[in-house]
Structure formats: C-alpha cells, structure tokens
DNA sequence: TCGGGCACGATTGTATACAATCAAGGTGGC
DNA sequence: GCCACCTTGATTGTATACAATCGTGCCCGA
C-alpha cells in the first residue's frame, strides 16, 4: 500500500499531498485522535517535511486536524453534537446555494448537471453503485459552483467532505433514490425560481422545517446521509 | 512602520505571521488584487519564507488570498455579489449559533458576556469608541464560542473577519446602538430559549425575514455593518 | 516592421540542515 | 521510598540552499 503522491497532479505539488492526506482522513486511514508525526507523513507520501507541513496548515484551517505548538497535530474528532451541527449548517447553506444557482447559473453548468443526471441513469441501469457515488459528489459540487459565490462553494464543499467523513463507516445506502430528485433540482434551476430551488434542495437534503431548532431525534433517526 | 512579528506571541511562530498578514489584509494594507511575493513578505514580517508560506496556506484556506501554481498569491477581491452573500450566510449561521448557545453556554461564557456588556457601558460613557469596537468583536467571538460547536465558531469568526474586511473603509458608524441589543442577547441566552435566541440575533444582525431570498435592495440600502 | 523562438531573470516549490521546545526517564538528595 | 531537578531523546519550528517553472524581453529571420 503505497500512498505516495504521483508527479501527475495538476497542481505544483503540496496541493496533491493535501488532498492525499485529507482523503486518507476521510476514508479513516488516519483515525480520529491519531497523532500525525510530520516525518512519518513525509515518508508515507514520499515528500519532504515542508510540503507536509503546508498541507497540515491547510487541513488545520479546514478543521480536519488540530495543532498544538510543539506538540504535533492530531486528527480531529467530531462528537455527535458536532455531527448534528454539520447537518444543520448544511441544511441552511445548500438551499441558499441552490437559490443563488437558480438565478446565476451559467448554461454550461446547467448542461453539466443534465449530463451528470444522464450518466447517473446509465450507471444506475448498469448497477455500478460506486460510479453513482462519484457522480453524486460531482453533482453537488457543480451545483455549489453554480451558486456563483466562491465563499458558498467552498463552504458547501468542505461541509460535504465532513459529512462524508462522519458517515464513512455506513456506506452504500439510498444511492438510487436521489437521482430523481436531482433531476427535479435541475428543472427548478432552469426555471430560475430561487425560493422554489431552496425548498426543493432543503427537502432533498432530508431535513425540512425547523430552521434553527436542534435536529429532532426523529430526523436523526432518519439518518441523513451524504449519498443524497 | 515595522510590521515584524514579535517573539511574544503565544503560539510558536508562524501562527503569529498568519495573524499579522491577515490583519494587514483586513485593514487594507495589502489591497485586493495585490500580489504578495513571498520574499517581500518575509522581509516585511522579519521571518524566513517558510513561515510565510505556511501562513499563506492558512489564508488561502480561509479565502483571503488566491494561489496559482508557480504564479504566486494575490489578495482575493470580493465583488458586491459576494459581499451580499457574506451578509446572507452570516444571517443564517449566527442565529444558529445563538440558538445553540442558549442551550449549551457555560456559566463562564455567560459571565464573560455580561462582563463585556458592563465594560462597554463604561467605554461608552467615557466616549472611547475604539475600545467599543474591540469589545464588540470580543462579544461576538465569545457568543460564537458559546455555541459549543467548533465548526460554527470558526465559520462565524471567519465570516466576521470577512465582513470587517469588506466594510473596512467606512469605519465608525452605529457603534453605540448595538450594546442595548447585546444586553438583550445575554438575557435571552440566560433564559435558555433557542428559538428566541435565534430571532433576537437575527434582528440584531439587521437582516430579518426572507431566509433564502437574495437580500432585497432596501435591506442593502440599510447598509448592514460589522459594528453591531 | 512584425512575429516566432529562445535564453535569461525572477519567483515559486522542495529538500536538507540547524535551533528551539517539550516530554520522559534517570539520578541524587532527603 | 519519594520527590525535585536535570539530562537526554524526539519532534516541532525555522533558516538556508537548491531545483523546477513561468513570464519577459531580446534576437533573429522573413
């Protein structure tokens, strides 16, 4: 198992290490609470300590690791309350992004979303679930970009990473239901109605009414899920 | 004008440079679009390029600078639409934080908030407006921390930095009105009602009804403001 | 005169070497 | 035996040196 980052990444270098470490954290390779020694990481990913340190700085700002001076970094651990907060925050921001997207989306983005829906149809028919998950991520990524707001896009993307991280253990559920809703989202975007876009995405996220109320137990029992 | 970072910072080092550069960006010392050459920064802040690079990685993740491989970093520029989005996002997240704080706040945090209100009374009576601005930042910082969610705290803090950045030109308005509302917030927190806390903070932020609707022109004309 | 191509300078990305700091274990005294 | 103190090892933080890459301006030819 060699995780060293190849020379093929489009970015200069350390960015690739950042992605590699982040992916390994999300996939559980580096468990929450685990200490990440710089030299061990540099050996594992095949670069020196400098890119590793820069990657850790990025991951710290993103909230995946915690850093204490002269005491090293550890993988962050999200307790249940924080996981619920992530769901709540996402249920606020992604509808906002959809409302923006309904007004600001470019034709290219709309076309890309339609293309993804079509690809998902094929993947679903062929029963390729892994493909479906990847397409799902892409769909929400493009949807966020369509908001036209860099801040919103980055926040939503990072929230989805965190969601994937939290729910990484319980993998492939509900992967097939969501694409009919995705198609609906595309249609609403095309209509250009921001309020309707926000409502549809709110329902899609799986967490309706109750804006600032802590998620009620029943909603949690529904187990909202990154695969939507 | 010597901006070099002193040895007295509580953190090991590069963290201090991060704060210094961020402050200078917010204060407009480094204008939006300006190129930040690493060597120039290391000379200016009195450290080598390594801490500078790490600081830039943090600031990139926070959205203050943009980085392109082998092309250097430039200070990010927020257009009007993005500025409005910041207001909107904040108007969603800070009430959520207040609702959490109403349930989760610690006695220490509540005491600290009351103390800040009292200090603001004195500062107001003495007419020290700069002191008031600093206390205002601290108040909202502690309020965010009282949410008990690391994610929420960091998001809200970063949003306030960005707001301060955007509205940095037009400085000392409305600094005196907000503290009566701050006192009200403390009272609501103490009562422990999350919905009421969210409503009060929403009103305090200055942007009421219309959750996912783009801010209407009238609301923008009111000129929402970090000094609240 | 204008366009293509190449060499050069400047800047970013990376690696190695060194200094500062912390934690743990040993040692001496009581 | 126990506690304070120090020493030592390991790890982080920083500085310097080197490699990779990009933009620029000059040169040359048509």
Image: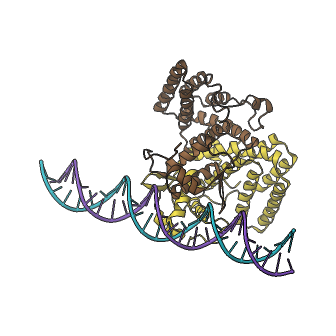
Chain colours: A brown, B yellow, C purple, D cyan
Q: Is residue A160 above or below residue B228?
A: above
| Quadrant of the rendering where the N terminus of chain B is positioned | bottom right
B33 left or right of B89 in image? left
Q: Is residue B150 visible?
A: yes
Give how far across and how far down residue B194 sits, in percent.
81, 42
Residue at (68% x, 46% y) in the render: A32
Give how far across and how far down residue A208 sits, in percent.
72, 29
D25 left or right of B120 in image? left
Front-most of residues A189 and A88: A88
Q: Is residue B182 above or below residue A217?
A: below
Residue at (57% x, 52% y) in the render: A58
Residue at (80% x, 66% y) in the render: B122
B32 left or right of B214 in image? left
Location of residue B111 (image quadrant) = bottom right
Q: Is residue B17 above or below residue A186?
A: below
User: How many numbered circles does the render carry?
Assistant: 0
Location of residue A155 (image quadrant) = top right
Give how far across and how far down residue A187 sits, in percent.
55, 23
Front-most of residues A181 and A35: A35
Give how far across and how far down residue B134 sits, in percent.
71, 62
Front-most of residues A20 and B107: A20
Q: Is residue B213 visible?
A: no
């Amino acid at each position: 198992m060699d995780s060293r980052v190849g020379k093929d990444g489009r970015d200069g270098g350390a960015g690739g290490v950042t992605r590699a470490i982040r992916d390994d954290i999300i996939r559980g390779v580096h468990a929450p609470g685990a200490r990440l020694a710089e030299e061990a990481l540099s050996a594992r990913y095949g670069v020196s300590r400098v890119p590793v340190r820069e990657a850790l700085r990025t991951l710290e700002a993103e909230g995946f690791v915690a850093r204490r001076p002269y005491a090293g970094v550890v993988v962050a651990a999200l307790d249940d309350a924080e996981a619920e907060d992530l769901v709540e925050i996402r249920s606020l921001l992604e509808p906002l992004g959809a409302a923006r997207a309904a007004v600001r989306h470019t034709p290219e983005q709309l076309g890309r979303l339609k293309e993804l829906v079509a690809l998902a149809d094929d993947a679903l028919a062929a029963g390729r679930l892994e493909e479906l998950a990847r397409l799902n991520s892409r769909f929400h990524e493009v949807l966020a970009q369509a908001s036209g707001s860099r801040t919103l896009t980055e926040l939503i993307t990072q929230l989805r990473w965190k969601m994937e991280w939290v729910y990484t253990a319980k993998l492939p559920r509900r992967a097939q239901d969501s694409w009919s809703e995705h198609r609906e989202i595309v249609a609403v975007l095309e209509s250009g109605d921001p309020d309707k876009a926000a409502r549809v995405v709110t329902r899609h996220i799986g967490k309706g009414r109750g804006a600032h109320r802590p998620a009620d137990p029943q909603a949690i029992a529904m187990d909202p899920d990154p695969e939507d």
